[in-house]
Image (spheres, rainbow, N blue to C red):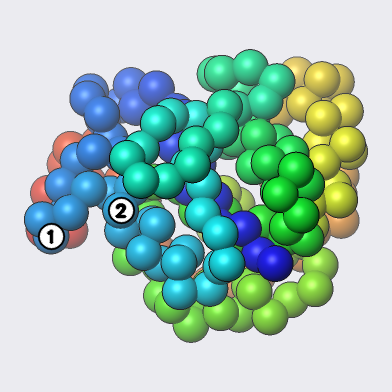
Amino acid sequence: MILGAVLAGGRASRFGSDKGAALFEGRALIDHSLTALGRHCQGLVVVGRDWPGVPSVSDRPAPDLGPLGGLAGALHYALAIGAERVLTLGCDTPLVPDTLLAELVARDTAVFLDGLPVIGIWPASLSPMLDDFVATDPRRSMRGWAARCGAEALAAPPLPNINTPADLDRLG
């Protein structure tokens, strides 16, 4: 089983308001990510915040640890429900091609997008190693984590990443 996890626990300080609830093409950014993940995953979760109609889990071991805290929360949840792998998306990448997600799902090991390491597929069994990394690496870098666990970087075309209202306006 593959769990789809939307990492949505960031402060959105550059965005200035609730980024996950911001509308793109009439739908919340989180909903775009959930729809994309739903085409490839047997279960869904939103990490770092509550979202109607979807299970939610907290960043782990605490909030404000960036994407790694979200990934740690997702991996622990995956283990608890018996999922073998977790496909991750941020809530701020509404235009990820379906073919790219299919390519990630087809891999058996940890793989992330070279330009956006928040987008990736991660074995749930990496959970204890990630806990150790989060506890001991002061930078808590997604790229540092990927190197530590031996994840492969998958080349991909540049994808829009919404960090500011202007980024969202350019898409719409």
| Amino acid bearing label 1 | Glu
Of label 2 and label 1, which has the lower sequence position?
Answer: 1
Side of 129 where 159 appears, left or right = left
| Amino acid bearing label 2 | Asp
- Front-most of residues 40 and 11: 40
Position of the N terminus by quadrant: bottom right
Side of 133 where 30 appears, left or right = left
Residue drawn at x 68%, y 80% as measured from the top left: 106
Side of 17 where 163 appears, left or right = right
Q: Do we see residue 88 in this rendering?
A: yes
Q: Which residue is mark 1?
A: 25
- Front-most of residues 48 and 164: 48
> Compared to 6, does 86 lie above or below?
below
Counting the numbered discs, the total is 2
Q: Position of residue 160 (x, y in %)?
A: 33, 58
Q: Position of residue 172 (x, y in %)?
A: 11, 58
Q: Which residue is mark 2?
A: 31
Give SS at disc 2. Answer: helix
- Front-most of residues 139 and 98: 98
Looking at the rendered image, the disc whose residue lies closer to the viewer, 2 or 1, is: 2
- Front-most of residues 123 and 92: 123
Dividing the picture into quarters, in which one does residue 70 lie?
top right
Within 10 angstroms of label 1, few (less than 14), some, or many (20 or more) residues? few
Q: Do we see residue 145 in this rendering?
A: no
Residue drawn at x 78%, y 60% as measured from the top left: 84
Give SS at disc 1. Answer: loop
Task: Give the CA separation, mark 2 to mark 1.
Answer: 11 Å
Q: Position of residue 98 (x, y in %)?
A: 43, 77
Residue drawn at x 88%, y 36% as measured from the top left: 128
Residue drawn at x 53%, y 73% as measured from the top left: 40
Within 10 angstroms of label 2, few (less than 14), some, or many (20 or more) residues? some
> Compared to 94, does 169 lie above or below?
above
